[in-house]
Amino acid sequence: MQKKEFSQLPLKDVEMAFEKFDKPRNADYQKIKLTRQFLRKIFSGFSSRKVLHKRDESVEWFLMKHKSTKERYPYYEEVYSRCFKDFPENFTVFDLGAGINGLSYEIFSKLDKKISYVGVEAVGQFVELMNFYFEKNKIKGKAIHESLFNIDKIKEIIKKQDKPRIIFLFKVIDSLEVVKRDYSKELLNEIAPLCERIVLSFATRSLGARKKFSVQRGWILKFINENFKVLDDFELGGERYIIFQK
Ligand SMILES: C[S@@+](CC[C@H](N)C(=O)[O-])C[C@H]1O[C@@H](n2cnc3c(N)ncnc32)[C@H](O)[C@@H]1O
């Protein structure tokens, strides 16, 4: 955690990652090296390092420096209008594993919605950047530095905000699954009763590449179909979005 990119990660996530490599066959330096490689894949690999300390660039500049928001950029308006279809004017959005997606807030206003935004993210620097942006632009938004593995805290955060509530889980389930298998299902079961709608997305091609993923997403689709009512399901810009409710 002496490296800047890992310096503000929740200890819990770092410990869970370290445990995977804390085996007698690995020397101490290997344990650290392997843990860092793993953490990079989950937390910082999607983003340019410049995002970690820059402040004075435009929103577009930042959104283009993170792979997820960059790929979504041309489609934001359509994605959000489908997410919010038939929802009232005022509501709360919880963006779990937000990255820097809170910086897309101005798209909400374009859709004539008055949204209170709460982003939850493990990378402290992304949290600081989003909060800086919200304060500077007097936006009704906040970012919270918390691990999605801290399920009680996540539920507390959700319960504190006004209804109706929509939860985003954009491109984050892969990260959760590599740390703890089937955790996405556990998380969905816990948070679904607290909100009116969930939007989950995953990449249909590997980030940056054009090739379609060969990985099977059948397990999550089956789980959603069996336990929830699907309202919409579409693909845009190499990202598949499933909108569902309890
Ligand atoms: C691929 S990025 C997607 C970011 C954003 N949801 C988007 O689509 O624009 C995954 C994000 O999830 C965050 N993340 C991964 N595991 C997490 C955890 N256990 N707790 C909180 N955030 C996590 C990472 O730090 C990263 O910012």
Image: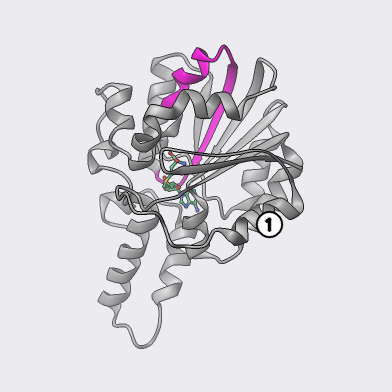
Q: In which quadrant is the C terminus drawn?
A: top right
Q: Quadrant of residue 2?
A: bottom left
Residue density around tag 1, few if under 14, some if 14–19, many if 20 or more, within 10 Å:
few
Compared with 70, 3 (above or below) is: below
Residue 227: percent from the left, percent from the top? Answer: 75, 52
Residue 115: percent from the left, percent from the top? Answer: 58, 20
Judging by the rendered image, the residue that carries numbered circle 1 is 223
**What residue lies at 36% left-to-right and 37% top-to-bottom?**
71
Kindly state the secondary structure of the residue where label 1 is placed: helix
Compared with 54, 116 (above or below) is: above
Answer left or right for 43 relative to 230. Answer: left
Q: In which quadrant is the N terminus drawn?
A: bottom left
Residue 197: percent from the left, percent from the top? Answer: 69, 35
**What residue lies at 25% left-to-right and 23% top-to-bottom?**
57
From this viewpoint, is residue 7 visible? Answer: no
Residue kind at label 1, given as amino acid type: Phe
Compared with 226, 71 (above or below) is: above
Q: Which residues are magenta?
A: 103-123
**What residue lies at 29% left-to-right and 78% top-to-bottom?**
28
Q: Nearer the viewer, residue 107 or 33?
A: 107
